[in-house]
Image (cartoon, coloured by chain):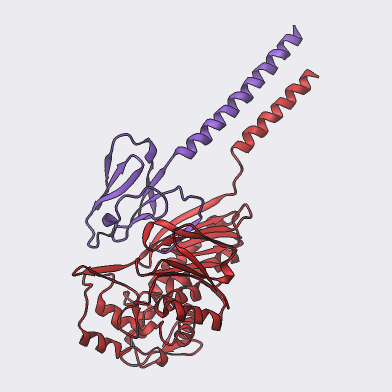
Chain colours: A purple, B red
């Protein structure tokens, strides 16, 4: 009787290990597929969006800016600032270059940076 | 025996779970809008919280001290008292010392007394426009970096002269922040002040920091990457800030010799150097000097490495970066030797 319960325990632990290994695999897989965009205002993180999970485009209204969120890309649709640098930059699809609206202190960045720690040249 | 197996399996499970959530060192990140740009600070390990907090305070303090647009700044006080000595902080003295060295060595390609020209062109304002030849000549007559005098506590600029530290202040700030981090016991950190990048030590995993250089012809792409430890990487490019008039674009890096946007045949200059202040001044100076002048400067004085992007599609890299720079764009790579 005792030996059977031990066998059961071994089976349970083996199943647990398999399940955890599988879930780790799935989680890392998911993480690789995510394209995370972050929207900051005054340096504070307001929104975190996985652009690859966006099925239908939508806009986010900020006090002075409108952000257009689409599948795999994000852009500043309009802004009430005079220079319109952020709007002219168009859509971004990677972390090479964040969209920054300096006058309104809004920043949109994609966190996947293709293995780099910083970008020089802004 | 079976109990032992169970314990062994338990240990395995804990290890598997433990490694899957890999124990990364604590990192603190902060984003600050200052000096007309967006800054990002990242520090790792112990004291990183306090260090980032202190750094934020320093950025705001320096921003107030160094802005030519703030009437209470030290720079504005120097400009308002042209002709007489003004007591200033060590931060201003250090930038003026580096500026003077780079001005002298570049034959005036870098000049902090350029403010009258910058104001005339109106860069960064909604009044940006192309001035007349007469206006440009008049503003150019006020340029006089040679007349700037500094003691160990004060500065005097010639009467009628006005200075701006815009081309060096971010570099000084990144240098200052990295020194602050080190002083507070932070051994791994990276700051990016609107593209002025400077790193403390190496990454927490012991590998070097990978800094991407933006492609001046397609800002969504990288030109290449450079691997650094304890260095500053600063880029000046005509693509960064500009305005358009009658279909022609005018970028913000003015050549003190012509009073107009520099046309030196370069589209960007990246400097890799241990001193952030020097790196910032050099990126502007070498952009104005052009390829030949830049390489000559590097050969004569050294102390830094450079990545020059030419308008004809070449990337000229000084040989000290041979092992740390890798090109990723479709440019022709050349190395410059001593």
Q: Position of residue B136 (x, y in %)?
A: 25, 85
Q: Position of residue A112 (x, y in %)?
A: 45, 47
Name, please, the residue furthest toward the top.
A1
Count of labels shown?
0
Q: Position of residue B207 (x, y in %)?
A: 61, 55
| Quarter the N terminus of chain B occupies | top right
Residue nearest the viewer, comparing A120 with A39: A120
- Whether residue B295 can be seen here: yes
Quadrant of res B124: bottom left
Residue nearest the viewer, comparing B186 with B86: B186
Q: Position of residue B189 (x, y in %)?
A: 55, 59
Residue nearest the viewer, comparing B160 with B61: B160
Q: Is residue B238 above or below residue A25?
A: below
Please give left or right for residue B307 compared with residue A9 in the image. left
Q: Residue at horizontal 32%, vertical 85%?
A: B80
Q: Residue at horizontal 36%, vertical 42%?
A: A72
Please give left or right for residue B12 compared with residue A105 in the image. right
Q: Is residue B38 above or below residue B265?
A: above
- Whether residue B92 can be seen here: no
Q: Residue at horizontal 31%, vertical 43%?
A: A69
Please give left or right for residue A81 compared with residue A32 in the image. left
Q: Is residue B127 above or below residue A108?
A: below
């Amino acid at each position: 009787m005792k030996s059977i319960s031990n066998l059961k325990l071994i089976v349970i632990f083996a199943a647990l290990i398999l399940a955890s290994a599988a879930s780790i695999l799935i989680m890392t897989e998911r993480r690789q597929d995510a394209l995370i965009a972050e929207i900051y205002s005054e340096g504070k993180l307001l929104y975190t969006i996985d652009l690859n999970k966006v099925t239908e485009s939508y806009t986010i209204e900020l006090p002075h800016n409108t952000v257009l969120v689409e599948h795999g890309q994000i852009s500043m649709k309009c802004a009430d600032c005079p220079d319109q640098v952020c709007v002219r930059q168009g859509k971004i699809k990677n972390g090479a270059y964040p969209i920054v609206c300096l006058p309104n202190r809004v920043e949109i960045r994609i966190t996947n940076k293709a293995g780099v720690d910083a970008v020089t040249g802004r | 025996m079976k109990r032992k197996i169970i314990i062994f399996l338990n240990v395995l499970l804990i290890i598997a779970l433990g490694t899957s959530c890999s124990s990364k060192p604590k990192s603190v990140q902060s984003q600050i809008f200052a000096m007309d740009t967006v800054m990002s600070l990242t520090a790792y390990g112990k004291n990183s919280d306090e260090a980032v907090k202190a750094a934020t305070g320093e950025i705001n303090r320096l921003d107030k001290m160094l802005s030519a647009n703030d009437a209470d700044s030290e720079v504005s006080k120097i400009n308002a008292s042209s002709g007489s000595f003004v007591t200033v902080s060590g931060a201003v003295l250090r930038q003026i010392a580096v500026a003077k060295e780079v001005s002298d060595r570049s034959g005036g390609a870098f000049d902090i007394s350029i403010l009258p020209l910058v104001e005339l062109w109106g860069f960064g304002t909604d009044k940006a426009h192309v001035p007349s030849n007469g206006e440009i000549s008049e503003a150019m007559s006020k340029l006089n970096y040679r007349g700037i005098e500094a003691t160990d506590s004060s500065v005097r600029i010639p009467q009628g002269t006005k200075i701006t530290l815009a081309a060096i202040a971010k570099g000084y700030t990144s240098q200052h922040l990295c020194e602050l981090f080190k002083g507070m016991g932070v051994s791994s950190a990276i700051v990016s002040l609107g593209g002025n990048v400077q790193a403390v030590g190496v990454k927490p995993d012991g590998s070097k920091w990978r800094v991407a250089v933006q492609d001046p012809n397609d800002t969504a792409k990288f030109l290449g990457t450079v691997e650094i430890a304890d260095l500053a990487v600063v880029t000046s490019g005509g693509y960064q800030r500009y305005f358009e008039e009658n279909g022609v674009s005018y970028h913000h890096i003015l050549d003190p010799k012509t009073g107009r946007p520099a046309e030196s045949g370069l589209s960007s200059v990246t400097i890799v150097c241990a001193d952030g202040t020097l790196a910032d001044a050099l990126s502007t100076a070498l952009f104005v000097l052009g390829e030949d002048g830049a390489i000559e400067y590097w050969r004569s004085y050294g102390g830094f490495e450079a990545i020059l992007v030419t308008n004809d599609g070449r990337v000229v890299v000084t040989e000290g970066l041979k092992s740390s720079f890798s090109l990723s764009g479709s440019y022709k790579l050349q190395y410059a030797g001593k």
